[in-house]
Amino acid sequence: MGWMLIIIPILVVWVASLCKIFLAPSSHSNPTFLNNGPAFQKRNVLLVVAHPDDESMFFSPTISYLTSRGHNLYLLCLSVGNADGLGSIRKDELYRACAVHKVQLQQVQVLDHPDLQDGFGLVWNHDLLAKIIAEEVDSHGIDALITFDSYGISGHCNHRDVHYGVRKFLLDSSPRNIEAWELVSINILRKYSGPLDIWLSNLESMRHPRGTVHWLLSEHPRKSFLAMAQHSSQWVWFRKLFVAFSSYTYVNTLRKIK
Ligand SMILES: [Zn+2]
């Protein structure tokens, strides 16, 4: 019977968390993210990821926030994810997932550069990444960047290199007043706590100076599943479990890096 004293409160908080997400989502996300002035300003935002499916596994709440508020979202995916020889399939899957996310498909760029191939232990050159990001920023008038933090959520070296590529761009060639944000990596207990993490993310955002950390609650968690399901080649049982139990399906905490 003792275990029920643990399980029941967890279930109660789990259900309460889902209720909070589904019943009044927009009132709980921080509405000032990328919108500091009194009037709404449409921003040109570039999300930079490493592989097809990063956007749906990790950034769904952010994408949902941006598209639902009318920001102009561009997606730069730096590889086709060809580690298992499925690059062309995965590229098509990414476009299908972006259609679910309501990202304009002409604003999705997927690279297949010989020096930026998917894989553990394959180092991506930060200068090359910074140059590619600079070209993307210039050609679309980007004024805000979003990417991984230095741990890269899963610790994948390609995610981490993307972070350092963005950093390099900001250091070397960021010509204008451009904002940059990183998706905060959280510990493994929080990572697999599903919707429960929305409370901790909220508390964490309050611990930081105003405007430097934002928590974005998913307004459509079902869309995360639907988008991830478009990545058919990756949609195996353990990824289904990951998406169900990952807190990144329900909330994103973004920290300002510039
Ligand atoms: Zn990835």
Image (cartoon, helix red, strand yellow):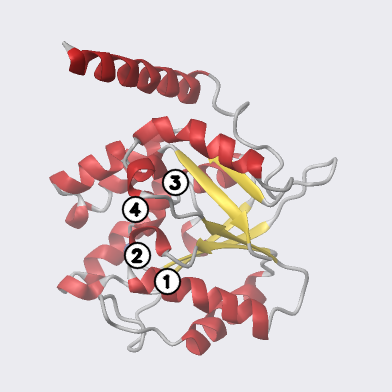
The quadrant the N terminus occupies is top left
Q: Is residue 197 above or below residue 178?
A: above
x then y, percent, for residue 186:
43, 50
What residue did someone put label 3 on?
60
- Mark 4 or 1: in front is 1
Q: Is residue 180 visible?
A: yes
What residue did someone put label 1 on?
160
- Mark 2 or 3: in front is 2
The quadrant the C terminus occupies is bottom right
How dense is the environment of label 3, judged by Cα within 10 Å: few (below 14), some, or many (20 and up)?
many
How dense is the environment of label 1, judged by Cα within 10 Å: few (below 14), some, or many (20 and up)?
many
Which amino acid is tagged 3? Ser
Left or right, 149 with respect to 15, comes to right
Q: Secondary structure at mark 1?
A: helix
x then y, percent, for residue 132:
52, 82
Q: CA distance from mark 1 to mark 3?
A: 19 Å
What residue did someone put label 2 on?
155
Q: Earlier in the sequence, mark 4 or mark 1?
A: 4
Left or right, 124 with respect to 67, comes to left
Which amino acid is tagged 1? Arg
Left or right, 23 with respect to 14, comes to right
- Mark 1 or 3: in front is 1
**Outermost residue, top direction?**
1
- Mark 2 or 4: in front is 2
Give yes or no for contact between labels 1 and 2 (Cβ–Cβ under 8 Å). yes
Q: CA distance from mark 1 to mark 2?
A: 7 Å
How dense is the environment of label 2, judged by Cα within 10 Å: few (below 14), some, or many (20 and up)?
few
Q: Earlier in the sequence, mark 4 or mark 3?
A: 3
Q: CA distance from mark 4 to mark 3?
A: 14 Å
Q: Secondary structure at mark 2?
A: helix
Q: Earlier in the sequence, mark 2 or mark 4?
A: 4
Q: Secondary structure at mark 4?
A: helix
